[in-house]
Amino acid sequence: QVQLVESGGGLVQAGGSLRLSCAASGSIVSVNTMGWYRASPGKQRELVARIFSGGSPNYADSVKGRFTISRDIAANTVYLQMSSLKTEDTDVYYCNVDAIYYSGSRRARGVYWGQGTQVTVSS
């Protein structure tokens, strides 16, 4: 099927920057929407940003102008460049990928989540 590996989280001071990466691998035919969500314990995951197969991005209002999502189609990788970070951006960030993959001789579609990466912004 499809595996996701995230990297790039960490601790940063308010106003700083971080870049998250998420690489999809496996028996992939094609990748559709790729995105990033975030959640705190006990809270529902909320969309941060996503990028569609045509390259159009979509952002949560809270991150517009500060975060940039991009993708490397050949590498099946999505990035989230986070700038001007605020303490309220502290959360666990999850990669989300909608992909078509080979299942035996057939094609199937699935939505996958990364393991999550912690982003902590200190004041």
Image (cartoon, grey):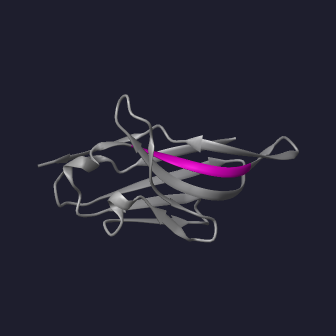
Which quarter of the figure is the N terminus placed in?
A: top right
Residue under the image location 56 percent in, 56 percent down: 34
Image position, residue 44 (x, y; %): 44, 36
Residue under the image location 33 percent in, 70 percent down: 65
Residue under the image location 27 percent in, 64 percent down: 83
Residue under the image location 20 percent in, 60 percent down: 16
Of residues 8 and 57, the one nearer the viewer is 57
Extent of the magenta region: 93-100
Q: Residue furthest front?
A: 61
Image position, residue 77 (x, y; %): 53, 58
With 93 as the anchor, is 1 left or right in this view?
Answer: right
Report if residue 73 lies within the magenta region.
Answer: no
Report if residue 96 lies within the magenta region.
Answer: yes
With 92 as the anchor, is 123 left or right in this view?
Answer: left
The answer to whether residue 16 is above or below residue 116 is: below
The answer to whether residue 7 is above or below residue 53 is: above
Image position, residue 25 (x, y; %): 61, 49
Image position, residue 45 (x, y; %): 45, 40
With 33 as the anchor, is 93 left or right in this view?
Answer: left
